[in-house]
Image: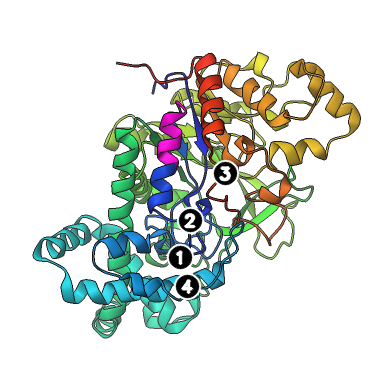
């Protein structure tokens, strides 16, 4: 897949300003796309859009959308909510998402919209809803039922009634009738999410902005994915608990590695099924994004497997995975896909060979480049063209926060490399370095464009609290910032070609 020289911005929709306490798919999202287009960007990179409590990489359904991203103002414009519904909104922190407060405020609004839809939807809207449910049936039915059970029982699926855990056909049919209103609600929310997202994506594409979306390799244990497809995960048949969980060995982010608690795949069973579940995941995400970023790509060659009783990842082991067979099957069924891969961490020659076999561009992160080794693969002088360069990712500190934590010697060395005497605008110096590199694509987190410190970090993998909640204020994306980004993008040949 050929990617022309270009650049873009990394920002998750939850980070948009909003009077509902969390960014959504409403008017601020459209204004952000205008900002991208007017500053000559060609990509908007997002994190997973799936439903979650806070962490978008721990989702209740990998193919579903997060209802918290639905815009109540868009629902109002459709006549499903009214201005009076917004009169008594609480005051939210404009810099952070207060997730519980958001849920308590927003979910009743989404429930009210569903009730209005049931009563007032036109025939055309009802037809659109039925068509959506039919097209999405292969994942939507299981997801909606799972969420209805979750809300009814309030416990993980492996603690439900045995006949439901085992998905006994008669029991499921009985509960489907009993929970019909709750199932309808979940399907309606998915309908509205996908309708709003589709409209936003179309707007972006009209502005010549392509969306890079994340496909995490793993799914949460307590998810519709695992409940409905137990056979393709490493689970104990009696307890339905993982027999092996995923994670990473000790690395840059943690000296003891990371234990993620996600069950690992039963790759033998998946291969017997021609990787049907994975093919469906790729097919589904392609409806929502233009380019797929595969998270933790190295685990498709070999993954770090940890016994669930371990408290650290040190005692895990590498287990080979059939990545080549998987991607061949995906290509055979779906054709050549626009894929980029996150190939950070412990990368072996086998991982590189798998990536190069399918011509997937990998990632370079500038924050990892300055260890004094002139041959370091993340130094721009060593890049191939076929890659993406980032100042940092959602797992990194911001450039300003990262730089402030370095020793004086490290700071002096970086400034010498950059050819500047002051660190006053270190974020712009690193942005310039990324954009001037030979990498086909350069992606800059919004936090680095704004020159923010560690308070704006999106995720710290070594911490379990205080992640995923950063938001920017509505006045931050100024004309001055737009013009400066446009100028530097054009200077380094990353502006879109005018037809």
Q: Kindly identify which numbered label has been placed on residue 89.
A: 4
Of helix, strand and loop, which one carries label 1? loop
Q: Kindly identify which numbered label has been placed on residue 23.
A: 2
Horizontal and vertical percent for residue 295?
Answer: 52, 42
Q: Which residues are magenta?
A: 32-41
Residue drawn at (47%, 50%) of the image:
13
Does residue 400 appear in the picture of this structure? yes
- The image quadrant where one finds the N terminus is top left
Nearest-to-viewer mark from 1 and 2: 2
The residue where tag 3 is placed is 476
Residue drawn at (56%, 15%) of the image:
438
Quadrant of the rendered image containing residue 121: bottom left
Q: Is 431 on the left or on the right of 190, as rendered?
A: right
Does residue 274 appear in the picture of this structure? no
Q: Nearer the viewer, residue 396 or 474?
A: 474
Note whether 395 is above or below 90 in the view shown.
Answer: above
The majority secondary structure of the magenta stretch comes to: helix
Of helix, strand and loop, which one carries label 2? loop
Q: Nearer the viewer, residue 170 or 208?
A: 208
User: Spatial distance from mark 3 to mark 4, Cα to Cα?
Assistant: 23 Å
């Amino acid at each position: 897949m050929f990617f022309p020289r270009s650049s873009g911005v990394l920002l998750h929709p939850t980070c948009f300003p909003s009077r509902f306490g969390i960014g959504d798919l409403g008017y601020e999202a459209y204004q952000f796309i205008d900002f991208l287009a007017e500053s000559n960007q060609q990509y908007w990179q997002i994190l997973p859009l799936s439903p979650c409590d806070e962490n978008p990489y721990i989702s209740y359904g990998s193919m579903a959308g997060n209802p918290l991203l639905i815009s109540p103002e868009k629902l109002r414009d459709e006549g499903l909510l009214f201005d009076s519904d917004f009169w008594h909104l609480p005051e939210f922190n404009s810099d952070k998402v207060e997730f519980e407060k958001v849920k308590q405020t927003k979910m009743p609004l989404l429930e009210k919209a569903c009730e209005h839809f049931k009563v007032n939807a036109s025939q055309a809207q009802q037809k659109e809803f039925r068509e959506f449910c039919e097209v999405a049936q292969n994942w939507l039915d299981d997801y909606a039922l799972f969420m209805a059970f979750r809300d009814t029982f309030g416990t993980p699926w492996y603690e439900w009634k045995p006949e439901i855990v085992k998905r006994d056909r008669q029991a499921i049919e009985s509960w489907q009738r009993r929970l019909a209103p709750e199932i309808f609600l979940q399907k309606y929310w998915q309908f509205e999410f996908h309708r709003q997202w589709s409209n936003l994506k179309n707007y972006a594409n009209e502005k010549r902005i392509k969306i890079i979306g994340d496909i995490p390799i793993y799914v949460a244990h307590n998810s519709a994915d695992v409940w409905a497809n137990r056979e393709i995960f490493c689970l104990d048949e009696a307890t339905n608990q993982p027999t092996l969980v995923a994670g990473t060995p000790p690395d840059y982010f943690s000296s003891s590695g990371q234990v993620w608690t996600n069950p690992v795949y039963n790759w033998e069973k998946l291969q017997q099924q021609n990787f049907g579940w994975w093919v469906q995941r790729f097919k589904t995400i392609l409806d929502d994004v233009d380019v797929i970023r595969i998270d933790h790509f190295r685990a498709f060659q070999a993954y770090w497997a940890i016994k669930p009783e371990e408290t650290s990842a040190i005692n895990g082991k590498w287990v080979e995975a059939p990545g080549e067979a998987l991607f061949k099957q995906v290509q055979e069924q779906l054709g050549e896909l626009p894929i980029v891969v996150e190939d950070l961490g412990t990368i072996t020659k086998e991982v590189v060979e798998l990536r190069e076999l399918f011509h997937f561009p990998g990632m370079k992160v500038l924050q990892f480049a300055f260890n004094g080794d002139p041959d370091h693969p993340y130094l721009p002088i060593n890049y191939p063209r076929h890659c993406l360069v980032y100042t940092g990712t959602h797992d990194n500190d911001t450039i300003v926060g990262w730089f402030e934590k370095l020793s004086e010697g490290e700071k002096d060395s970086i400034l010498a490399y950059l050819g500047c005497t002051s660190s006053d605008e270190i974020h712009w110096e690193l942005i310039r370095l990324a954009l001037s590199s030979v990498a086909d694509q350069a992606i800059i987190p919004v936090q680095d464009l704004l020159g923010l410190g560690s308070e704006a970090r999106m995720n710290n993998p070594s911490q379990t609290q205080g992640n995923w909640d950063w938001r920017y204020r509505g006045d931050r994306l100024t004309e001055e910032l737009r013009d400066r980004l446009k100028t530097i993008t054009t200077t380094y040949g990353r502006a879109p070609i005018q037809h």
